[in-house]
Amino acid sequence: MKEDQLRILKTMHEATTRMDLNKFANAVHLSPTEAIADVQELAKEGFLRKVGAGYGLTEKGKNALKMSHIVPPENVFYFYIGVGRPLGFSANSLKEFYRFVAQVCSDSLDFHLYRGDFENWFAQIVGDKDLANQIAAFKASGICGEELRKALLNVGDAHYGIGELDL
C-alpha cells in the first residue's frame, strides 16, 4: 500500500465530520485529482466502501491501519533464537512483525511459539486475543519449522490481509 493511500485511510478514520473534496485533499497532502484516484483505488481493493455520497472504512481498511500502527519502544517485539541469543531484528508494527516472520530462521519462530511470546504479544500489545488464541493452538498442535512459518503467515493473512501488503 502506498503512503498516500495509508494517509487517506488514517485521515478518514480520524475524521469527526464530513469534508468536501478540497479540504480532504488538503488534509492528505494531495491534489483533488490524486485524492479521488487513490480513494477509488482503495474502494476497488476493498479498503473503503461507498456510504451515501462519501466513503467509509471497511474491516480490511481498519486492519491496514492496524498493520501500520507503531507500538511504543517498550512494546517492540525482539526476535531471538534462544535465551540470550538475539537475532538483531525487532518489529515495531504488525507489518514489520510479519515481514520478519517471513525472513527469520525457523528456529526463532519455534523458540518464540513454545515460550508463548507470540500469543502474549498479540494478546497484550496488539490487543487481538482471537489471534493470540489461534497462535496458542499452534503450540498445542506441535507445529514447528517451516510449517509454523506458513501457519503464522496464513493466520496473519486471514486476520489482517498481509498477503495483499508489501512486506
Image (cartoon, rainbow, N blue to C red):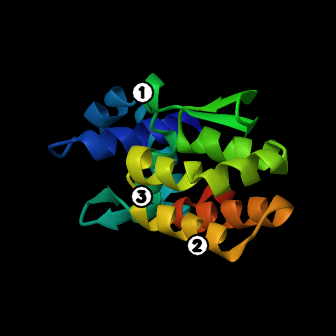
Q: Which mark is residue 128?
A: 3
Element marked by disc 2: helix
Please state the total of marks drawn on the protein image: 3
**Label 3 crowd bin: few (<14), some (14–19), many (20+), radius 10 Å:** some
* Mark 1 residue type: Pro
Q: Nearer the viewer, residue 9 or 130?
A: 130
**Label 1 crowd bin: few (<14), some (14–19), many (20+), radius 10 Å:** few
Q: Which mark is residue 137?
A: 2
Label 1 – label 3 distance at C-alpha: 17 Å
Q: Is residue 24 above or below residue 160?
A: above
Q: Which mark is residue 72?
A: 1
Of callouts 1 and 3, the N-terminal one: 1
Q: Residue at x 48, y 51 (%)?
A: 120
The quarter in which the N terminus is drawn is top right
* Mark 3 residue type: Asp
Residue 157: percent from left, percent from top: 62, 63
* Mark 2 residue type: Ala
**Label 2 crowd bin: few (<14), some (14–19), many (20+), radius 10 Å:** few
Residue 131: percent from left, percent from top: 49, 64
Q: Residue at x 68, y 67 (%)?
A: 154
